Image (cartoon, helix red, strand yellow):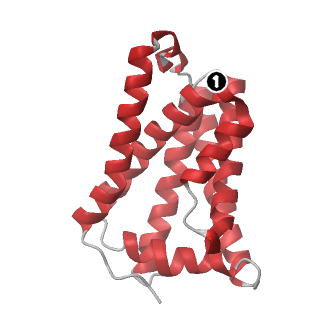
């Protein structure tokens, strides 16, 4: 039932290629519409750093709690299958630096596009749904897209409150970092 192990290079390529495409779309958007340049939203302060860290940690803990809950229920067991038999084997051969790179790149690119560019144009609901669609791995695993949509709404709200893209970027990257660490531990049969 589990996916065959993928070589480290293949996983990195599989994740980074769509991120490169998203980066190019964002850069092209900003080039043709300079007033939408997201650099204006890179406000940094210690509270912004802590908000991002706490958001990422909170989301990761909530996600882990949901995973533990789903293991005990039949209705959401597909989420357990997604983590244990699809995602975990995919990330099995990654080393820590790979996880850091993937977390930072995805957090940066996805927040620039979905919160920095799309959210101001189409609003919270549509930008969050678009993010959920991007994270829709298939009908059986619908709950993952629902989770991603909710996370996107939280990121958009925090961006709106803080007027800084760094809050969702940091939160997104921290959430991904913790999640991928847990998935690689799971794949290597370590207790999580």
Q: Residue at x 45, y 64 (%)?
A: 181
In the figure, 41 relative to 109: above or below?
above
Location of residue 14 (image quadrant): bottom left
Q: Front-most of 144 and 159?
A: 144
Residue 1 x %, y %: 47, 90
Q: How many marks?
A: 1
- Tell me the residue that label 1 is attached to: 121
Query: In screen coordinates, is 29 left or right of 170?
Result: left
Query: In screen coordinates, is 153 left or right of 98?
Result: right
Location of residue 190 (image quadrant): bottom left
Q: Which corner quadrant holds the C terminus?
A: bottom right
In the figure, 150 relative to 7: above or below?
above
Q: Residue at x 59, y 30 (%)?
A: 118
Task: Say if residue 139 shows up in the picture.
Answer: yes
**Which structural element holds mark 1?**
helix
In the figure, 178 relative to 67: above or below?
above
Q: Residue furthest top?
A: 35
Task: Say if residue 192 shows up in the picture.
Answer: no
Residue 47 x %, y %: 62, 28
Location of residue 146 (image quadrant): bottom right
Q: Residue furthest bottom?
A: 1
Q: Residue at x 37, y 48 (%)?
A: 18
Residue 100 x %, y %: 37, 51
Q: Front-most of 27 and 43?
A: 27
The crowding category of the residue bearing disc 1, from other C-alpha atoms within 10 Å (few below 14, some 14 to 19, many at least 20), is few
Residue 37 x %, y %: 47, 16
Q: Front-most of 52 and 136?
A: 136
Q: Residue at x 51, y 48 (%)?
A: 174
Q: Front-most of 104 and 149?
A: 149
């Amino acid at each position: 039932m589990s996916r065959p192990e993928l070589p480290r290079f293949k996983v990195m390529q599989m994740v980074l290629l769509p991120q490169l495409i998203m980066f190019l779309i964002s850069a092209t958007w900003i080039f043709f519409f300079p007033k939408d340049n997201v650099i204006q939203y890179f406000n940094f302060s210690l509270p912004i750093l802590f908000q991002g860290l706490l958001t990422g940690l909170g989301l990761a803990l909530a996600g882990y709690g949901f995973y533990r809950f789903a293991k005990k229920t039949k209705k959401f067991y597909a989420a357990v299958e997604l983590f244990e038999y699809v995602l975990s084997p995919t990330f099995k051969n990654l080393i820590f630096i790979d996880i850091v790179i993937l977390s930072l790149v995805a957090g940066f690119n996805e927040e620039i596009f979905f919160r920095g560019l799309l959210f101001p144009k189409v609003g919270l609901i549509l930008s969050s749904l678009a993010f959920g669609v991007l994270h829709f791995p298939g009908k059986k695993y619908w709950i993952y897209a629902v989770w991603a949509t909710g996370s996107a709404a939280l990121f958009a709200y925090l961006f709106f409150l803080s007027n800084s893209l760094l809050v969702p970027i940091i939160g997104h990257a921290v959430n991904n970092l913790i999640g991928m660490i847990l998935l690689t531990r799971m794949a290597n049969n370590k207790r999580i």
